[in-house]
Amino acid sequence: MPIFEVKNIKYTYDKYENSLKYALNDISFNIEKKDFVALIGKSGSGKSTLISHLNGLYKADSGDILYSGNSIYSKDYDLNSLRFKVGIVFQYPDYQLFSETVIDDVAFGAIKKGMSKDEAYKKSLEVLKFLNIEYLKDESPFNLSGGEKRKVAFAGVFVMEPEVLIFDEPDAGLDTMSKINFYNFIKSLNNDYGTTVIYITHNLDDVVEYANKVIVMSDGKLIKMGKPYEVLSDEKVMKEADLELPYSISICNKVKSMGYDIDNTKLTFSDLLDSLKKL
Amino acid sequence: MIRDITLGQYYKKDSIVHSLDPRVKLVATLIFLISLFISTNIFAYILATAYLITAIILCKVPFGFIIRGLKSLLLLLFISIAFNLFLTPGKVVFSFYAINITKEGIILALKMAIRLVYLVIGSSILTLTTTPSKLTDGLEKGLSFLNVIKVPVAEIALMMSIALRFIPTLIEEVDKIMNAQMSRGANFEKGNLIEKAKALIPLLVPLFVSAFKRANDLAYAMESRCYVGDSKRTKLRPLKYKRIDYITYIYLLVFIILIFLTRYIKIDSTLSIMGSFRGALKLYYER
Amino acid sequence: MGNIDVKNLIVEFDIFNADNEVVSKKRVIDDISFSVNEGDFVCIIGKNGSGKSTLAKCLNGLIIPTGGDVLIYGMNTKNEEQLIDIRKNIGMAFQNPDNQIVASIVEEDVAFGMENLGFSPEEMDKRIDESLKILGIQELRFAQTSKISGGQKQKVSLAGILCMKSKILVLDEPTSMIDKNGRLDLLNKVYELNKKEKITVILISHYIEEISFADRVIVMNQGKIILDDTPKNVVLKDELLNNAGIELPYITRMAKELKSFGKKLNGNEFSVEELCQFLK
């Protein structure tokens, strides 16, 4: 059974005007447990709106979303508990940090989830240790560097032990080293603990590296979903979504245009390197 | 969602009222408000009504849109009518149990109601036909005489226009912060008043922190674009009076004179003039 | 003497305790010197906290040096009477496109700098027209600033700078909050300004990919300049870059691997075309 079944959802921001401009227009897809899904598309294509539907922050005008087989729109569904299972880490950590100390901030979600204060703080400390930022626990979250803030914000969501982790542009504004560290960490969560990951990104070369599925959105519609190489090498789709090709695809295209043969299903850095070495 | 709120209720339309200089509209609104409060008798109210109807027709904004602002005022209106109606002493015309309704009470309540409704409609027309930035321009220019007594009018106007510019940004930000906190299980709707107030902390702290950061960044950006507080700045679109603006000023002058004149019309004397006129007519016919 | 002369620049920030007393000083920029000539395109890179943004703010006198001097066309930023003249010559665009827009309508925002300098409405009108045209955003002239994209907002602030006929453009991580398409688009425009309008450009960035636009790269780490060379030479020093927490661009990394494998490459290629040369 898929963990998410999204069925024909539609959503519009201006409900009071009769313009039928849909932010989400008839979107359907399934996400399986342990998937690592990259959500790509130009800004304004509806990616952020879509993820806000997945934990019930926004309610679709029509259509249905099933989480582990249950419709989150059915009357007796506990939306609040869904938010603890589906954790969203938004782009700007500054929008969620508010407490006096880091540990207070991290514990917020755990307390809201219903843990006792002692339990919540114990759990928060564990999470900080797990993320190697235990030394920050008594700092004020406002005095941290950008990278540290991101980690604390992530800890604040992670403490709720979500089954699905959703990230809105986790790599924006990060320097390359921090980015690589971040993705490796998430990948290991995905591998070792089976956490389902969905993330919005503009960096298509990283998509090839980490994701096992890609969803392309354009103008409120889902225009393609599939394995990274299937999606990214589909010229028609990339053109429709108005996306820059990742370097790996450009290299493959160039190599082919020079009359050589190259396997364009293997697009990770090391696979591509191996293919190039053989030429 | 909070996104749905529209601020600055400018209604785009091509009309004479829209094209007027904001200073003229500010003065017109001010004169109208003053006229409401110096009106003592029925003639003044008739004049004010005529003035308002002219404005409503000329501004081409649908009437339903104009009176939308009244909705939020209904409670206040109701209370003020009730107070005036029940608590004014005078000649009792109607009474049940301990409540006496007097003639003076009815008149006073009616006056208050008309004043409030007209006040709201009048100022709605101003904001519906003038963009916020035009409005601040108008205020800046119109109040520039305050510079003499060292009121930094230009700086205040710039502050206002920057505040207006940041309203959409901040609304979006509130939305984002609420989403982030709700994703961590925060609930902004549940609970009693104290719980609700407490629930706002996770919203307000990030909002203030961000606002301070924005202010800091903006200060740098303004400085690097050569902004110096006390300089003589020029304007891209300086306000300039057109023919229609002068004509409107003349109308306004006539209106305010008429309103003042109504103060000298005594209802009793009018009646007696009319009475003697009737007497004269009667005499004429009898003859 | 160049356009910009930075001599032994030192910047220290005070660290306060809870009682608002200065307890220590943090050295953010540690004795750096360089000069930039007219028409150069210089990219300053470094990871977060390397001091690059502070350096940018020193260039137009937003931050006054603790030690050393910053001279713009010979004018010292420490000299307060000359600050306006310095800022007229050196335009600055910042990281967060939202926080540098002053007005609700695009043309009013573009005019802000000129209004401060007391231009006539006719002159402003003309210059707004010109600068929006150069950036290819004429159609946005009467748009609301809250309704345009981040990339467009950055272009609007560039237009505001162009209007003032600044000869130097300092861009403080202008692309870090806009998406990839917008980023390339913006940098291509900046490149054009540099080549066609002969505007000196100082681009501060943490995206190493962006150095390929520049003629010269300055790499900063912990408040010091560790490299100052052409892009092609800088990427050859991968050990130094690694120490500064900077990873090489994708293509360059690929080229380097292939070179060490024995392919005919220099290991400092930036574009797909250059990389595929080894197949010829």
Image (spheres, coloured by chain):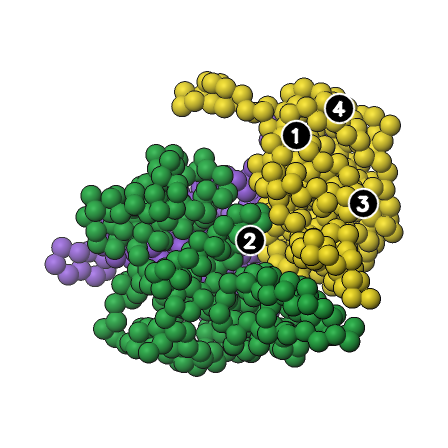
Chain colours: A green, B purple, C yellow
In the figure, B62 relative to A172: above or below?
Answer: below
What amino acid type should be assigned to the residue bearing mark 3?
Answer: Asp
Q: Which residue in the structure is indicated by mark 4? A: C7
Residue situated in front as seen by the camera: B100 or C25: C25
Q: Chain of mark 1?
A: C
Q: Position of residue C31 (x, y in %)?
A: 68, 23
Res. A2 visible in picture? yes
Q: Residue furthest front?
A: C262
Q: CA distance from mark 3 to mark 4?
A: 21 Å
What amino acid type should be assigned to the residue bearing mark 4?
Answer: Lys
Q: CA distance from mark 3 to mark 2?
A: 26 Å
Res. B72 visible in picture? no
Q: Position of residue C272 (x, y in %)?
A: 74, 62
Q: Earlier in the sequence, mark 3 or mark 4?
A: 4
Q: Which residue in the structure is indicated by mark 3? A: C215
Q: Secondary structure at mark 4?
A: strand
Q: Chain of mark 4?
A: C
Q: Which residue in the structure is indicated by mark 2? A: A172
Q: Earlier in the sequence, mark 3 or mark 1?
A: 3
Residue at x-position 64% and y-position 25%: C30
